[in-house]
Amino acid sequence: MELALSDVRGLSLDLKGIGHAFGATVALDEIDLTVAAGELIALLGPSGCGKTTMLQIIAGFLRPSRGEVRFDGARVEHIPANRRRIGMVFQNYALFPHLTVFENVAYGLRARKTAKDVVAAKVEQMLGLAQMASFARRLPGELSGGQQQRVALARALAIDPGLVLLDEPFSALDKNLRLDMQIEIKSLLKTFGVTSIIVTHDQEEALSMADRIVVLNKGRIEQIDSPDALYDRPASLFISSFIGHTNLLRGTVTDADRVQLDAGPEIDLGRSAQRRRGTPVTISVRPENITFGAEWPGAILVTIRATVPLGAVSVTEGVTASGEAVKVSQARAAGLAKAQVGETAWLAISDVSRVSIFSTPVDDVSKHQQRSV
Amino acid sequence: MTPASTTASRQMLPVIPLAALFLAAFVLPLIALVAISLFRTPQFAELSLAQYLRFFSDPFSIKVLTDTVWLGTEVALATLILAYPLALVYAASGQLMRTLITFLIMLPLLTSTVVRTFAWIVLLGRDGIINTTMLSLGLWQTPARLLYTWEGMVLALTQIQLPLMALPVINSLLRLDGNLTRAAEGLGASRARIFITIILPLTLPGAIAGWLLVFAAAATAFITQTLVGGGRIILMPSYIYQQAVGVQDWPFSAALSLIFTLAVTGIVFAVGALSRRYVRGVDAA
């Protein structure tokens, strides 16, 4: 029996004013989020930021203390998890260990009392898409991590969900396998046109998977944006250090568009700093936005502390006169001035328009920065 | 002696006292039992298999054995049915409630079987608490016969043996990954379906462990069977006692003991082996 994929369509999701507290602990506060049908969203944040609570509220395992959850415009808070048309992929996959791969994928269909021949056809189709057709009779314990994950996704998609929720789906996989699986699963989800929400604390995972990333911190949404926008225009110092690597440098606004860095030079932002003269600020410069230069205006003098070859790129870390660390990331093939440890070098910002400026003192985020490195 | 075997025999040293006790108190009596069962007459004359032939050609004796096996099965089933709701409540409870439930389950284990059995006599007797309550409420016109009945015996044994079932079932339920039931729920399964297709198969090792313990304990519960069941219900333990002490027919009672022992252990092993074949993907233990 041939089953068409076209009858599968993602639903749209609206969260309005969602709040949730466990006793006196506020897990989520004033969450507003609109997800379009077919969109792939990542909920990203450090542990304890509320992302798992948010996932459980969307799935229906948890009823929010406040606010509205809408699927395709209709409120669903009162609808239990087993009637929400949601596919879940758990962190440990949660495959039923006593059932074969076939029975696992068939589980949701059988729970819906689907006719036997339809179940067989659907399961076969799902396992084919997940490239697991030849493993139908195996037990989950006989599969590798990547294979288990394919089965978990096939099982979630078999029930034609309007929404797929993935909870830290790649954390149990080898690092080498992760990117392959991310690409594979992203393309599967897109083939289905199903709306997907992936919860993760791994920014690389969020960047590689999502159309848009929702950054959560302490139960609140810090920013919702595309991966590129989040990387290039972080809305807060927390995000600039949580997404990718960055250099945070202290400074003071000296003119409408100029900042005097503690590290030495005064830099021209090429745009308004939008702060009063004398305001202490922190600027964020990505390591790939810095190059080795000479004693140019705006260049920072550092003492080289370490050089780390990372395959495609080489990262060099220097220390400024003010004691701040600055990382420079260069394509290794470029063969630019090879800095020797202990020598001094001049570092220049390549593109000042990609420098972000924040009023938050750097100390507030140092903890998060350490975690993301 | 090679050094390796010296080390091996040194390692065995600590178990020698236990092995000696086992030999003296179990293996030797068992050999004696086999020897005694092979005599044709109570006067220990003439070796033969007469006692075994006598058992298997006597419908009464066979009925006693099947009744006893059936009693063990019924009690095990009753404890199983009671243990699952208890385990589900336990798993869903907070720490305080769990402590309370654990205490209530363990309580019977802390008193002697004799005390527990007499408590049931007090409850079930003609002038017992159940009868006097029902009579004074006017629900019953005459006192019901509860003591010295099969049902009364099953009831008492069920209560007494419940911990042996509840503890392994609770243990295996607690080890069940909560994401599995959540995954089943997310896939649209009802609570009943989740229980039958996920919880039950994955806690089966615990249930089987409990089943074997309760079956063996209930089938061989001489004191409770005798005191609550009374003289009119004859089961293997009392049958053996009667033949040995009452009739003084030691060879026949020895044969009865061996047949009973083999029947109980045979069933225990058969159930264990069958369950290992059908329980897939779940850790035993």
Image: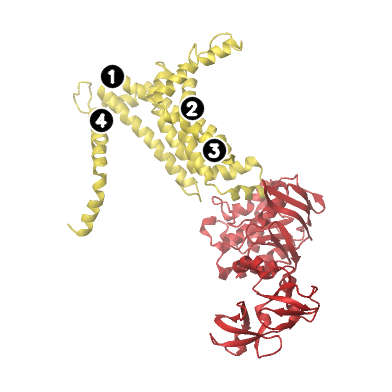
Chain colours: A red, B yellow
Q: Residues within 10 Å of mark 3 (few under 14, many from 20)?
A: some
Q: Secondary structure at mark 4?
A: helix
Residue corresponding to mark 2 = B159
Q: Residue furthest top?
A: B141
The residue at which mark 3 appears reads as B98
Q: Amino acid at mark 1?
A: Val
Badge 4 vs badge 1, beta-carbon distance below 8 Å: no
Question: Do tags 3 and 4 sit on the same chain?
Answer: yes
Q: Is residue B235 above or below residue B17?
A: above
**In which quadrant of the rendered view does residue B218 lie?**
top left
**Mark sitting on residue B33:** 4
Labels 3, 4: front one: 3
The three-letter amino acid code for the residue at tag 4 is Leu
**Label 1: which residue?**
B245
Q: Position of residue B127 (x, y in %)?
A: 49, 11
Residue B201 is situated, as x and y percent measured from the top left of the image, at: 54, 44
Mark 2 residue type: Gln
10 Å neighbourhood of mark 1: few (<14), some, or many (≥20)?
few
Q: Nearer the viewer, mark 4 or mark 2?
A: 2
Q: Amino acid at mark 3?
A: Arg
Q: Are marks 3 and 1 in contact (CB under 8 Å)?
A: no
Element under label 2?
A: helix
Q: Nearer the viewer, mark 4 or mark 1?
A: 1
Mark 1 and mark 2: span between their CA atoms?
30 Å
Q: Nearer the viewer, mark 3 or mark 1?
A: 3
Q: Nearer the viewer, residue B123 or A188?
A: B123
Pick whichever of labels 3 and 4 is earlier in the sequence: 4
- As helix, strand or loop, the secondary structure at mark 3 comes to helix
Up/down of A204 relative to A140, above or below: below
Alpha carbons under labels 3 and 4: distance apart = 46 Å
